[in-house]
Image (tube, rainbow, N blue to C red):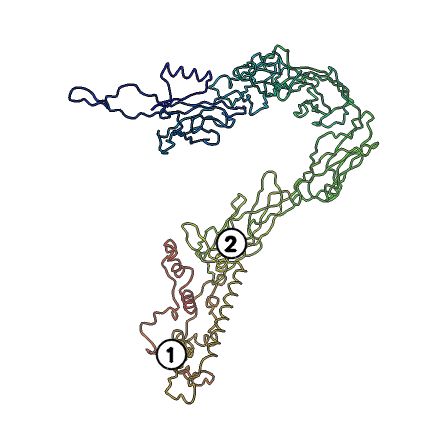
């Protein structure tokens, strides 16, 4: 069985068939003529029997069909034929796959394939279909289904296109010929592998002779030298792309490239004219602009930047010039004041130079230009001018009213020399201390001055011309008030001086210094002394250290706060002024116990305990209020509980034994008040303590102090203790107002008299100790109280009284 394929007769297909036959390159499966030894069997007689196998009857190939067919009939594609087809119509051909039955149809009897529609290769380049031959009578396949491809053959039906056009490009002016500007690329939808349909050639339709284009690459280049941006800046270049290698009949497309010449510095600055004139009044302010000048530059941006300068010394000494970046103008300002009477004209030589210069354009000449500016100074009526920019004067404090402080002078700078009047600007200074003479400018005092109140006075003096009072000039005047010795010195500190109870004779209590409101040119000199005319202070003395300080020194050993807590010490301080003044200050010295912290003593002030804890008065009040509120709440709670207590017997019917408990306490300490045990220790003091048990005994005040000296207490009378107890018992029995105390008082009375005597110091007169206990101070704060008990200056009786008072407390 054999199938033959009929192709449409076109030159291209003929060439393909020729190549296939010559080089054996084919996509079909040819019928093989080579013997197949695998299907052979050797017989016994040596002959070979060949087993024939039915071969596939498809000689396969590709079909080609031209795109864009516009004929009235369907386009013939090819013919399918099987060698089983005898031409009697018994074979039926079936076509399936892409486009089968719609785009491609087949004649079931002849096997002819036609395309019913116009095809577009750019939309679909090939179609994959399947063919099969059936027996029309039995409907059995004569051949297995085979696949083949129908390719759409390209024709030149698409013109080149520039998808992103139009384009924008730029190139510097004055560029060399052949400088690359831009590259354009056109696209063609036709098949680039078949013919010249997609082969594009570029050309310029508009833009010559300034630019050229490479026909193959599409690179646009400059074609003309010395293109000047100042002459023409923008160019519109039209580029054409044509397929079929540019031959006649090819399709074409075009686009526009807008090319701009960018600026380079190829133009020097130029002043429009060489000579300028300017009028400036002499009243022009220094630092303010008085005029402007401008040089033109045809370039743009940084290439047109110009720096102006004054190149002659005459003009540069009085005027300055700066460049305005926005307007590119030279702003002329005044450096020094103008004076019409001294100089009336100035000549300025101004130069303008480009700041950015390209060396490759140096042949065009120097990129700078010069111009001459003549300035005429105008005469104006000027205000008076003071002889100095500011004045500093001085005057002593407490000077008499009308004392001359100093004088200011001003003159009219104009040629007419008008008289000048002076006055003080009171709007800036509310306190009027000075006055000025209107004609002479002499300043005098009109109030008494105090250096300690205001050491400096700043005033402003104004001057005006008599002919034109509206023209004013101002000058600051500073007046220094000089010091005189009119304030006495005084002690520097007002704080209480602390004296430790353990102070020794000769010990420095505190070093004091003095202050004086006056100002001494060579430094302050103070001397100190105690107030004269009073008895010598037995407790303290004063030592002048001759360095403007003095030391307070203790004259006695030990101080007792219980005896006397505060001392006053008047001190006289003398200054070294002319005349010398003195002041008396009274210092308060407070006695308090001290603690040892290394070598530094610090005193405890019981009155400052609360303040040392960091509690203010408001905080203490708030704490007390909180405590009171809590107490009130507790009382109310207890009261409510007692009021709600149920009765012991709920009802008469509920009769049973009940135990009632009363938690009433005794009198406590009041039970022993009638028989105070202290009375047994010192019966002589019983009568004194009878009615004053709530008062702390002041034994120390009764038996001496710092002023009275230290004395032993008088000997206590020996009283019969048994008699005293009986007397107290009778008083207790006769007291009808006291509560019925049930208490038992037991006294172990030893009797009266003893050959050894009492070892208590309460009844002994005591003697002075001959041992020195000062070394106890060096043992630390634990032995400080013991050292005080054994000090030599206090006798034993006074010590016993102090101990008794402490125990009673």
Residue 753 - label: none
Number of dots carrying numbers:
2
Q: From mark 2 to mark 1, how far is it between C-alphas?
A: 50 Å
Which percent across, then down, holds residue 674? 42, 79
The secondary element bearing badge 1 is classed as helix
Q: Which mark is residue 497?
A: 2
Where does the N terminus fall, quadrant-wise? top left
Dot 2: element: strand
Q: Nearer the viewer, mark 2 or mark 1?
A: 2
- Residue at 37% across / 88% down in the picture? 656
Residue where numbered disc 1 is placed: 721
The answer to which of 57 and 437 lies nearer the viewer is: 57
- Residue furthest to the left in view is 44
What percent of the width, then of the height, locates residue 647? 44, 83
Q: Position of residue 99 (x, y in %)?
A: 46, 31
Picture quadrant of residue 32: top left
Mark 2, Cα crowd under 10 Å, few <14 / some 14-19 / many 20+, is: many
Q: Nearer the viewer, residue 489 or 593?
A: 593
- Estimate the x, y position of residue 520 in percent, counting from the top left: 61, 40
In the picture shown, does residue 258 fall above or below 601? above
Say whether residue 668 is left or right of residue 583: left
* Side (left or right) of 669 relative to 751: right
677 versus 387 height, above or below: below
Q: Earlier in the sequence, mark 2 or mark 1?
A: 2
Name the side, left or right, on which 270 lies relative to 652.
Answer: right
**Residue at the right extreme of this rendering:** 467
Up the image or down, 90 lies above or below 659; here it is above
Q: Nearer the viewer, residue 663 or 87?
A: 87
The reply to whether the C-beta atoms of the residues labelled 2 and 1 are less than 8 Å apart is no
Image quadrant holding the C terminus, namely bottom left
Between 594 and 477, the one lying in front of the other is 477
């Amino acid at each position: 069985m054999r199938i033959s394929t009929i192709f449409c007769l076109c030159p291209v297909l003929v060439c393909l068939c020729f190549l296939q036959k010559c080089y054996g390159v084919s996509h079909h499966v040819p019928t093989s003529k080579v013997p197949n030894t695998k299907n052979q069997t050797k017989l016994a007689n040596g002959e070979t029997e060949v087993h024939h196998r039915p071969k596939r009857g498809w000689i396969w190939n590709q079909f080609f069909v031209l795109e864009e067919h516009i004929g009235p009939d369907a386009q013939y594609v090819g013919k399918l034929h099987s060698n089983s087809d005898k031409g009697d119509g018994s074979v039926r051909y079936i076509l399936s796959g892409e486009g089968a039955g719609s785009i491609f149809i087949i004649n079931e009897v002849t096997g002819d394939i036609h395309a019913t529609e116009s095809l577009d290769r750019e939309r679909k380049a090939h179609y994959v279909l399947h063919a099969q031959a059936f027996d029309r009578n039995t409907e059995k396949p004569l051949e297995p289904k085979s696949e083949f491809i129908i390719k759409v053959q390209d024709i030149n039906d698409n013109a080149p296109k520039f998808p992103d056009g139009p384009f924008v490009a730029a190139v510097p002016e004055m560029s060399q010929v052949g400088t690359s500007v831009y590259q354009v690329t056109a696209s063609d939808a036709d098949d680039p592998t078949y013919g010249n349909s997609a082969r594009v050639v570029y050309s310029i339709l508009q833009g010559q002779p300034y630019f050229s284009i490479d026909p193959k690459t599409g690179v646009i280049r400059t074609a003309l030298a010395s293109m000047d941006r100042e002459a023409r800046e923008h160019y519109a270049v039209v580029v054409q792309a044509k397929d079929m290698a540019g031959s006649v009949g090819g399709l074409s497309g075009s686009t526009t490239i807008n090319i701009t010449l960018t600026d380079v510095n190829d133009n020097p600055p130029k002043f429009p004219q060489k000579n300028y004139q300017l009028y400036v009044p002499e009243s022009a302010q220094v630092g303010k602009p008085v005029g402007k000048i401008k040089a033109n530059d045809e370039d743009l941006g940084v290439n047109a930047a110009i720096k102006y300068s004054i190149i002659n010394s005459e003009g540069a000494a009085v005027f300055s010039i700066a460049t305005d970046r926005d307007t590119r103008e030279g702003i002329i300002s005044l450096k020094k004041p103008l004076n019409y009477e001294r100089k009336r004209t100035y000549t300025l030589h101004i130069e303008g130079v480009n700041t950015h210069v390209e060396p490759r354009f140096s042949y065009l000449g120097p990129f700078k230009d010069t111009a001459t500016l003549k300035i005429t100074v105008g005469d104006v009526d000027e205000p008076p001018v003071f002889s100095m920019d500011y004045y500093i004067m001085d005057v002593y404090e407490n000077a008499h009213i009308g004392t001359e402080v100093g004088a200011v002078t001003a003159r009219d700078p104009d040629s007419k020399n008008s008289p000048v009047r002076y006055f003080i600007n009171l709007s800036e200074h509310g306190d009027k201390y000075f006055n000025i003479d209107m004609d002479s400018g002499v300043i005098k005092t009109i109030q008494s001055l105090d250096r300690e109140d205001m050491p400096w006075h700043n005033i402003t003096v104004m001057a005006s011309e008599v002919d034109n009072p509206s023209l004013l000039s101002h000058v600051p005047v500073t007046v220094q008030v000089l010091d005189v010795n009119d304030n006495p010195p005084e002690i520097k500190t007002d704080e209480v001086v602390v004296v430790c109870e353990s102070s020794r004779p000769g010990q420095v209590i505190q070093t004091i210094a003095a202050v004086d409101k006056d100002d001494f040119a060579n430094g302050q000199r103070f001397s100190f002394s105690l107030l004269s005319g009073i008895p010598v202070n037995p407790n303290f003395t004063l030592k002048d250290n001759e360095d403007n300080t003095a030391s307070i020194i203790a004259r006695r050993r030990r101080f007792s706060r219980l005896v006397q807590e505060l001392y006053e010490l008047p001190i006289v301080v003398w200054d070294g002024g002319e005349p010398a003044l003195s002041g008396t200050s009274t210092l308060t010295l407070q006695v308090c116990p001290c603690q040892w912290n290394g070598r530094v003593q610090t005193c405890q002030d019981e009155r400052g305990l609360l303040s040392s804890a960091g509690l203010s008065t408001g905080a203490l009040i708030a704490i007390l209020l909180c405590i009171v509120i809590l107490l009130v709440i507790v009382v109310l709670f207890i009261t409510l509980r007692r009021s709600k207590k149920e009765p012991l017997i709920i009802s008469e019917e509920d009769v049973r034994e009940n135990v009632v408990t009363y938690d009433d306490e005794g009198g406590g300490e009041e039970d022993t008040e009638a028989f105070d045990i202290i009375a047994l220790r010192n019966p002589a003091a019983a009568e004194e303590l009878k009615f004053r048990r709530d008062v702390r005994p002041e034994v120390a005040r009764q038996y001496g102090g710092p002023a009275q000296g230290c004395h032993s207490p008088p000997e206590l009378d020996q009283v019969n203790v048994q008699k005293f107890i009986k007397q107290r018992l009778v008083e207790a029995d006769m007291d009808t107002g006291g509560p019925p105390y049930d208490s038992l008082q037991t006294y172990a009375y030893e009797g009266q008299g003893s050959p050894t005597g009492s070892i208590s110091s309460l009844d002994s007169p005591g003697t002075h100790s001959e041992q020195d206990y000062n070394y106890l101070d060096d043992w630390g704060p634990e032995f400080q109280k013991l050292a005080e008990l054994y000090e030599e200056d206090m006798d034993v009786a006074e010590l016993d009284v102090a101990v008794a008072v402490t125990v009673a407390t």
